[in-house]
Image (spheres, coloured by chain):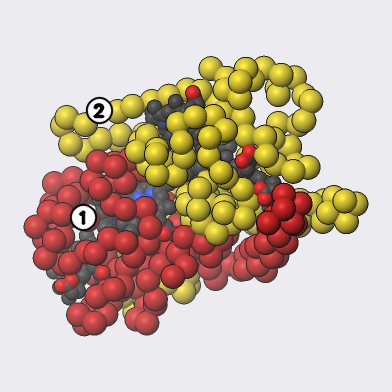
Amino acid sequence: MTGAAARWRALVAVAAVVAVAAIDATPAAAEYGDVVINRRAERGGVRPVVFPHWFHRIRFRCKVCHSELGFRMRAGANDVLMADVIDGKFCGMCHNGQTAWGAEQCDLCHSGKPGTPPGIQGGNETRGPGRW
Amino acid sequence: MRVRRALVAVLVAVAAAASAQVAYKRAWPTLAADGLHDPASPALAILQEPSEALSALPPDFAGNLVNWMASLDGGYIKPRSTVLADTRVTLRSTDVLLKRTGELPLVVFPHRQHTAWLDCTNCHDQLFQQKAGGTMINMFLILQGEKCGVCHGAVAFPLTECARCHSVARGSDAEKTFRNLVRE
């Protein structure tokens, strides 16, 4: 691809994204950065998990979860089992009744609308990382 | 050439208009109506509404409608850097100038702001080389959710905010203060 062609292609892509983002900016959208985790939850008979970035980043820097605690930065990339959470892994590293309320508060994590597919949500997203 | 310049102008205008519209409202969806939470879930009575927490933070035009950098630097929020006892926190303060921006203003990548939130390993060396100009980055990759687009467009401010990355006009004094693409 020549430099000019590549740039053209990028511009067209930018145009498409900006257009989609502008149309998408409806108030009914989920909060920016919300992640639905639903590889197993619904199959296991509970509501999908909703993880709010906005809530957690007020309290923790990204590096706490994505470096210290080892959450991979890609929606769906972390294979979380409920047993892990109870064992103090993933969400359970904090949701253990000490740093935050514990795993017995099922509904607070399993609060998603049934049928919601996993992935990153929110008005201005690029359909990039969360796209499978 | 002229067509492309016009397209860029239109894009910037649309992005600005889209942001202005959102900022004017500065309204967050309620949990019950966000299309994500089950309105029948008993959790809705307990979970915090975004508007309750976010309306107290410095405003922005896109994403969470919060300027997270200003929130952190201004002390509005005090997020923890570690939860384990012996984690080392690493910081860096250089700015790197990225010049392959076609006709748009140059991009400045600031380490200070990023390492305030992130660890070096979140970016190095998977996403970026530790060498100014060493990484192939372009808008196409970013829009695909690679490079800067891993975070921008997902959790950090979205890609509609062109000018926040494309912040240094060509030939400006700001460009001249960069030595070898890096500024302390």
In depth, the one of A37 and B5 nearer the eye is B5
In depth, the one of A109 and A78 nearer the eye is A78
Tell me, yes or no, if residue B61 can be seen here. Answer: no
Q: In terms of secondary structure, where does tag 1 sit?
A: helix
Chain ID, mark 1: A
Residue lying farthest left? A87
Q: Which chain is yellow?
A: B
Q: Is residue A104 left or right of residue B148?
A: left
Q: Which chain is red?
A: A
Could you tell me how far apart the alpha carbons at marks 1 and 2 are, in whole angstroms? 20 Å
| Residue B98 location (% of width, % of height) | 62, 34
Chain ID, mark 2: B
The disc label shown at residue A90, or none: 1
Tell me, yes or no, if residue B184 can be seen here. Answer: yes
In depth, the one of B141 and B157 nearer the eye is B141
